[in-house]
Amino acid sequence: MNDVMVKPFSAQDLKRMLMAYAPAQREVEVEERELRPLIEEETLLAIAKINPESGMDLVDQVVGLFEQQTPAFINEMEMAVREGDAAEVRRLAHAYKSSANNIGAVVLGRRLAEIETLARDEQRILTAEEASELDNLVRESLRQLLAAYVRLRSEFASAGGA
């Protein structure tokens, strides 16, 4: 930090100066968060092994269904938050939590369990920042799920699976 502040300066001036450097730290935090694995790939492999004869067919269906459900979940959760509907936030978090856990998105599943509990026990909905963080977590979980799915499908094809 090579900038200079001349006295007297206000708290607002100091905040403005510090905030000019805060985005760099925020970018590091975002990069670290995006590098963390959100999908337990073993879950997809376990789904594939449920019926060895059909191989990836069940994984195809489960991943496809999760991918289809995601945009609707995001839209419905945004609407429930905007309307302040804690019961709907709870219902959505509960339903999507099960889907997330079933495909190995355990970080997302845990966050949705927290949201469900707060909505049920305290009638609390998400703040705008929390809703944005959830949106990012859902999108990144889906991105990582699809990447894991492509890897697993490739491995299965190489091994002579379906």
Image: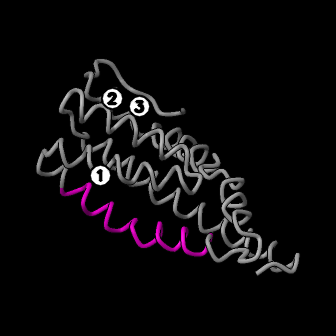
Which secondary structure class fits the magenta region best? helix
Cα gap from disc 3 to disc 1, whole angstroms: 39 Å
Residue at the image point whose x is 60% and y is 75% from the top: 60
Give the amino acid type for the residue marked by disc 2 in the picture: Lys
Identify the residue at the far right of this view.
Answer: 159
Disc 1 target residue: 92
In the picture provided, is 47 more to the left or to the right than 81?
right
Left of 110 or right of it: where is 58?
A: right
Q: Amino acid at mark 1?
A: Leu
Q: Residue at x 62, y 52 (%)?
A: 39
Which x, y percent locates residue 138? 44, 55
Identify the residue under disc 2.
15
Circle nearer the N terminus (3, 1)? 3
Q: Specify the segment rendered in magenta.
A: 59-79
Name the residue beneath numbered marker 3: 18
Q: Are marks 2 and 3 in contact (CB under 8 Å)?
A: yes
Asked if 119 appears above or below 93 in the picture, the reply is above
